[in-house]
Amino acid sequence: MQEKKNKSWLSFLLEVIVLVALFTLVQYALTVGLINQSYQINLVTMCINIILAVSLNLINGFTGQLSLGHAGFMAVGAYVSVILTNFMEMPFIIGILGGCIAAGIAGFIIGVPTLRLKGDYLAIATLAFGEIIRVVLQNIDYVNGPAGIVGITKLTSWPWLYWTAIITILVIVNLMNSSYGRAIISIREDEVASELMGINTTKYKVLAFIIGAMFAGLAGVMYAHYFYIIKPDTFSFLRSFDMVVMVVLGGLGSTTGAVIAAIFITFLTFGLQKYAAMRMVIYSLILIIVMIYRPQGLMGSKELSRKTFSRIWSGKK
Amino acid sequence: MNLLEINNLYKSFGGLGAVINFNILIQSQELIGLIGPNGAGKTTVFNLITGVYKPDKGQIIFNGKNIAGMAPYNICKKGVARTFQNIRLFKDLSVIDNVKIAFHKDVSYSLASTIIRLPAFFQGEKNIEEKALEYLRIFKLDTKRDEIASNLPYGEQRRLEIARALATQPTMLILDEPAAGMNPQETRELMELIKWIRQDFNLSILLIEHDMSLVMGVCERIYVLDYGQLIAEGLPEEIRNNKKVIEAYLGEEVGKC
Ligand SMILES: Nc1ncnc2c1ncn2[C@@H]1O[C@H](COP(=O)(O)OP(=O)(O)OP(=O)(O)O)[C@@H](O)[C@H]1O
Ligand SMILES: [Mg+2]
């Protein structure tokens, strides 16, 4: 028992060391100028995509509720944080918290009525929500309507990006490996049976929606404070579609899969920059191929975890 | 004490009465059978009791409270648990996780302590794990704790479903055709198990079953439904010789045993 405890402490320590080392390595490379401008943008996009994919996976993958409105929550986070930091000149941390909370509230407001809907109906309702957010933003003069907000102070830095992405992953992983996580997964598995086991399924669907929305908001904050400009069109349906592709590609219900797919899609987009028009075609093709040959996605619902590593380590299957 | 009292329960689908003025009275720790030909409305009665369907009319008084129309998860918390005619496990989850989910309604740690991994979380998880294993042991499923539920053989899936229902700590367990698809040997074992559960867990059991030998063998009283209506109730011998019941079944099954 004691030995087991020591071992888990040791692997915890090891994980922390790996995380810090990775962070420091990139930080060092950035400081000495080893990473050029376009790779820097790629790096930023990657972290933002990881946050988006992992949080959408909570809703689409673990809870089994098909949402197509994730970009809408991202927009809420982005706009609210920019209002706080740029218009009201508050510190970045207030912008981050404000953006997350606002997106979470939006998640609650959207979640309560729409999560009664099932399958296709929910997908359409969330899609409509995303579009409504966009159109509303286009019509608010305070945020310059369709032209958007330009000249946002660049506050997003590598430490913020890296650690917020890590926190996102940690929160979702911890949540899913708990009684709350099992309750959430049981909804996906069989909603009726879950309800009859004493689980208030509506409550947990809304909870998953709120948490997912908060992290989408976080991604929006990071995005806005790096790319200088945000417009309502930045957060169109196409962006939601990107996120769904990542989640489906990675495997619905696998955080590991979501992370891998987010990295893959980021690099793919980067590589296809010259053929921007072809991007959607290639996305669609990848989706079709995955659906035919590996419908459960890259990882299925499996995770890479400490257990997996120790199993590989000890040579067992 | 009356544990469950149903008065004039009525439910129709598209104008057709599926359950028509149904009445039942169950004392605590009774073992009651509900039988009837296919489509008689038995499963519908179960769905009404557990809140899957809302009744059109009537009262369902459980432990002195009218639970008619309450949300299923609240009815579960009041102490009613069930299994399904066509097994509804959480298919892609492990055997032990299926049982663990039943403990969620009494989860001892908060969402915050989950996310930042406070000691309360580890303690709570340890308790849940131990309790879940206890139930698996009772149903001889502990050696398969990490197997995916849908990979279990049929009889074990049925047992796991009962284990999961019991793990919600009900005072009333309702079983919808628990022996369906089992061979005679498994059915006999199941009969013993059902009797034993009632004793050991101190609960009432209401079961639907087509296997007459099982029903007659374990149930203390039997209710018979036909076309949504109660046509008979009484002791097993009374039911066996009831003319209306024999007619409803065309004599075949009841006559055999
Ligand atoms: N959700 C529903 N919608 C429409 N009709 C339904 C629904 N559920 C049940 N019914 C109808 O109600 C009647 C009773 O069905 P029920 O499933 O309760 O029968 P049962 O006694 O359990 O039969 P079996 O022995 O075949 O399981 C049937 O005619 C069935 O078609
Ligand atoms: Mg039935």
Image (cartoon, helix red, strand yellow):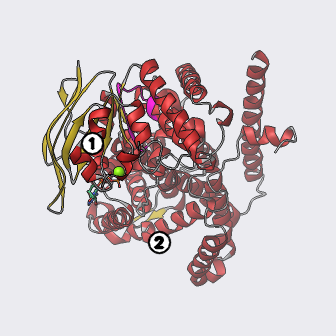
Q: Nearer the viewer, residue A104 or B236?
A: B236
Tell me the distance, in whole angstroms, between the alpha carbons under discs 1 and 2: 41 Å
Task: Name which residue lies at 46% across and 57% down.
Answer: A152
Residue A262 placement (x, y as % from top left): 62, 60
**Residue B205 shows up from this direction:** yes
- The answer to if A150 sits in the magenta stretch is no
If the image is split into quadrants, where does the N terminus of chain B sit?
top left
Q: Nearer the viewer, residue A210 or A143?
A: A210
Residue A66 placement (x, y as % from top left): 43, 60
Would you name the residue on which mark 2 appears? A238
Task: Name which residue lies at 28% across and 30% down.
Answer: B235
Would you name the residue on which mark 1 appears? B51
Q: Nearer the viewer, residue A210 or B123?
A: B123
Task: Name which residue lies at 41% across and 52% down.
Answer: A77
Residue B216 placement (x, y as % from top left): 38, 35
| Chain identifier of the residue bearing label 2 in the image | A
Ligand 1: give its quadrant: bottom left
Q: Residue type at mark 1?
A: Gly
**Quarter of image, res A258:** bottom right
Give the magenta part as a residue range.
Answer: B165-177
Q: Which mark is residue A206?
A: none
**Residue A84 shows up from this direction:** no
- Local SS, label 1: loop
Task: Name which residue lies at 61% across and 79% down.
Answer: A285
- The answer to if B170 sits in the magenta stretch is yes
Q: Residue type at mark 2?
A: Leu
If the image is split into quadrants, where does the C terminus of chain B sit?
top left
